[in-house]
Amino acid sequence: MAWDLLLSTDYGLFSLFVIVFVIGMGVWFARFFSTKMREDQARFGK
C-alpha cells in the first residue's frame, strides 16, 4: 500500500524526488568539502 502511494500519486513521486535529491545533495557536499579540505592541506603543507 505505501509503495503504491509512493510510486503512483503525484505527491508520492514528488516526495521520492525530494528524498533522492536531498541524498544526492548530501553526497555532493561531502565530496566537495572533502576535496577542498585535501586541497587546503596540500597547499599549506599540514
Image: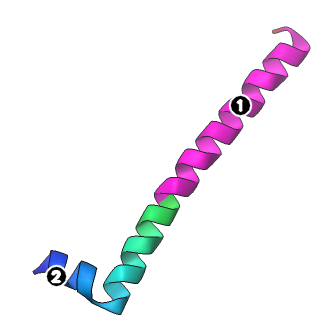
Q: In the image, is 37 to the left or to the right of 15?
A: right
The image position of residue 32, as x and y in percent, is 69, 40
In this view, the residue in front, 17 or 41, is: 17
Q: In the image, is residue 33 above or below residue 37?
A: below
Q: In the image, is 45 to the left or to the right of 21?
A: right
- Please, what is the dominant secondary structure of the magenta stretch? helix
Q: In the image, is 16 to the left or to the right of 32?
A: left
Q: Which residue is drawn at 39% across and 77% down?
A: 15
Q: Mark 2 points at which residue?
A: 4
Q: Residues within 10 Å of mark 1 (few under 14, many from 20)?
A: few
Q: Do the residues labelled 2 and 1 touch (CB within 8 Å)?
A: no
Q: Name the residue under label 1.
A: 35
Q: Residue at x 29, y 90 (%)?
A: 9
Q: Between marks 2 and 1, how big is the CA–CA gap?
A: 40 Å
In this view, the residue in front, 7 or 36, is: 7
Q: In the image, is residue 35 above or below residue 24?
A: above
For marks 2 and 1, the one nearer the N-term is 2
Q: Which residue is drawn at 89% across and 17% down?
A: 43
In this view, the residue in front, 8 or 18, is: 8
Q: In the image, is residue 39 above or below residue 36?
A: above
Q: Is residue 25 magenta?
A: yes
Q: Which residue is at the far top?
A: 45
Pick the quarter of the image with the C terminus. top right
The magenta region covers 23-45
Q: Which residue is at the far front?
A: 8
Q: Is mark 2 on a helix, strand or loop?
A: helix
The image position of residue 3, as x and y in percent, is 17, 75
